[in-house]
Image: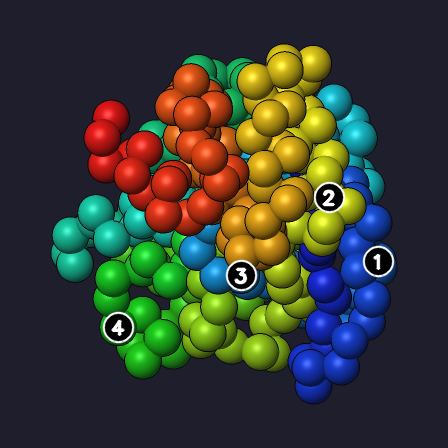
């Protein structure tokens, strides 16, 4: 069901650098304004599809369709960093293999470690929801580590990875809600998610309807109601509108004046 949204590229000075043509370009050179930095920073309002975008890039990567030479991808939710105690100390490999991926001990794990240490650029780390980190991380000390064997609090590991002190050259992607503070010197590329364009919304509705006449009815109703259409430009709201309408098509058919926000609200309320 993934449908492309508007992914605008901005420079560190907020100059507009165009749009990504597809998720496959997420880690490409397109839009890079600081080659020394290692973080692709994606922001957008709630529901604009930051988490889904990461999932889609992971799916493309697994099929070899993401524009990157990386052989390893480790996906983290920033929320999990808030679950650690202040006194917790672990190494980067613990964070990866014990708290995220189950990789059998032994040769396989040693091979992965060896390969990443030799070629850090072969690894992509994604951190979803940077705004959800519940701590005074940014105001904290400047303490960072550079050895993958050294133990430290997971937030220190995160900070060291993002700055490149740890696994220098590895690729990092961070998502956050609009307005989240982030050290600009760490950002190599900025992507702002702006929701669906009208054409993209049409593609989404076509996919959703998938030849189903009832669903097409919902699509027609959305296209004929400007307010509803604007709401649907935010992917999350679009999904809610489609889900609620399509499960209540019989009720919607009985509405004399077409679908309005009020009718959707009434349908949801009465379910
Ligand atoms: N590109 C997309 N194509 C299809 N559906 C999408 C897309 N982006 C988002 N959605 C729909 O919107 C819902 C919310 O998306 P998502 O969770 O990625 O938003 P988010 O930006 O991560 O929000 P938050 O800031 O709350 O974490 C998804 O579950 C999905 O139904
Ligand atoms: Mg999210």
- Indicate the position of residue 48 as horizontal and vertical percent values: 53, 52
Find residue 200 and name its label: 2
Taking the image as drawn, is residue 234 in sight?
Answer: no
- In the rendered view, tell whether residue 64 sits above or below residue 236: above
What residue is rendered at 54% in x and 26% in y? 110
Circle 2 sits in a helix, a strand or a loop, which is it? helix
What residue is rendered at 38% in x and 62% in y? 131
Label 1 to label 4, Cα distance in Å?
33 Å
- Is 121 left, or right, of 87 in this rendering? right
Please report contact status of discs 1 and 3: CB closer than 8 Å, yes or no. no
Find residue 136 and name its label: 4
Find residue 29 and name its label: 1
Which badge, 2 or 1, comes first in the chain's sequence? 1
What residue is rendered at 80% in x and 30% in y? 65
Mark 4 burial class by Cα count in 10 Å: few <14, some 14-19, many 20+: few
Q: Nearer the viewer, residue 142 or 70?
A: 70
Label 2 to label 1, Cα distance in Å?
24 Å
Q: Quadrant of the C terminus?
A: top left
**Which residue is labeled 3 in the image?**
44
Label 3 to label 2, Cα distance in Å?
17 Å
- Indicate the position of residue 252 as horizontal and vertical percent values: 44, 28
**Callout in the foreground (1, 3):** 3
């Amino acid at each position: 069901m993934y449908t492309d949204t508007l992914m605008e590229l901005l420079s560190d000075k907020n100059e507009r650098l165009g749009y990504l043509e597809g998720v496959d370009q997420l880690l490409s050179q397109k839009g890079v304004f600081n080659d020394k930095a290692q973080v692709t920073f994606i922001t957008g309002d709630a529901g604009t599809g930051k988490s889904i975008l990461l999932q889609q890039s992971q799916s493309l990567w697994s099929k070899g369709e993401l524009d990157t030479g990386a052989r390893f991808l480790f996906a983290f939710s920033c929320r999990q960093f808030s679950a650690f105690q202040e006194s917790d100390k672990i190494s980067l490999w613990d964070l990866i293999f014990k708290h995220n991926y189950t990789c059998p001990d032994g040769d396989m794990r040693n091979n992965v470690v060896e390969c990443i240490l030799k070629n850090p650029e072969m690894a992509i780390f994604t951190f979803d929801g940077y705004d959800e980190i519940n701590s005074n991380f940014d105001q904290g000390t400047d303490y960072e580590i550079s050895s993958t064997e050294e133990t430290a609090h997971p937030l220190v590991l995160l900070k060291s990875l993002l700055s490149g002190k740890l696994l220098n050259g590895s690729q990092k992607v961070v998502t956050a809600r609009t307005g989240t503070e982030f050290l600009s010197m760490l950002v190599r590329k900025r992507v702002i998610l702006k929701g669906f364009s009208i054409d993209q919304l049409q593609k989404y509705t076509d996919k959703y309807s998938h030849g189903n006449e009832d669903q097409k009815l919902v699509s027609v109703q959305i296209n004929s109601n400007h307010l509803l259409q604007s709401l649907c430009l935010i992917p999350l709201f679009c999904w809610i509108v489609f889900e609620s309408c399509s499960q209540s098509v019989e009720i919607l058919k009985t509405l004399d004046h077409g679908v309005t926000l009020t009718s959707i609200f009434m349908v949801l309320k009465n379910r």
